[in-house]
Amino acid sequence: MSSDGDGSGVYARRFVRDGSPLGDVFQVNSTTAGQQRAPVVGVNRKGEFIVVWSSNQTGDDDVYSRRFAADGTPLELEHRVNSTILGAQSAPALAMNPAGAWIVVWQSGDAVFAQRYDADGAAILTGGVQEFQVSEVGRAASAPRAAMDQDGGLVVVWTGAGADDADGIYARSEEHTSELQSPCNLVCRLLLEKK
């Protein structure tokens, strides 16, 4: 990252398979106010990509994203991912499947939230709302990560406290439906599945 005229900006550069640069470095963020930080990127099978980052351009941190064509041409202006604007929305992570559907997860206070999108960049409603809480209400959660398969099934993991107040790594999974399954302790579940 380097200066975009007002604090730090988010920059990208494309590369071919052998690691050779494909074009010049370009600026991802279109709004330069405040600090732009913690970028993550996802790519679909056509080479189109999404960049997601955290920015304090309006005061508290919010999560922003921007889509690009395979040649690096922007497909849209940056937009705020989170609907909740009270408090810091930070630590974004991104998962994208080969068809181009994607999900952004982030930390909102002591909880983990998510927003899903279709391959055209349209927000998908989950339970009638755009963003939704992934972690259990009332249980501290942080450092989210996500993975999505080719059919749109997904898993979101985070660190935090579970129902027994034990610290651990927790997860929610979705198997091609609109509902995430109840949180579980991922480490315990993996140990049970190995038996």
Image (cartoon, helix red, strand yellow):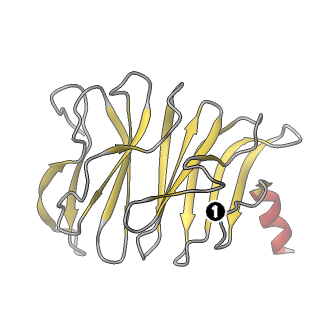
Q: Secondary structure at mark 1?
A: strand
* Left/right of residue 39 with respect to residue 145 in the rendered view: left
Residue at coordinates 81% horizontally, 63% vertically from top-left?
189
Residue 187 on image: x %, y % = 77, 58
Task: Give the farthest residue toward the top.
Answer: 59
Residue 43 on image: x %, y % = 36, 67
Q: Nearer the viewer, residue 29 or 142?
A: 29
Q: Quadrant of residue 160?
A: top right
Above/below status of 86 relative to 175: above
Residue at coordinates 75% horizontally, 61% vertically from top-left?
181
Residue 75 on image: x %, y % = 24, 59
The C terminus sits in image quarter: bottom right
* Left/right of residue 10 with respect to residue 81 in the rendered view: left
Residue 29 on image: x %, y % = 25, 42
Residue at coordinates 57% horizontally, 38% vertically from top-left?
107
The N terminus sits in image quarter: top left
Residue at coordinates 29% horizontally, 68% vertically from top-left?
48
Amino acid type of disc 1? Val
Count of marks placed on residues: 1
Task: Give the farthest residue toward the left.
Answer: 24
Q: Quadrant of residue 165?
A: top right
Q: Nearer the viewer, residue 134 or 187?
A: 134
Other residues around mark 1 within 10 Å, as few (<14) / some (14–19) / many (≥20): some
* Left/right of residue 149 with respect to residue 127 in the rendered view: left
The residue identified by callout 1 is 155
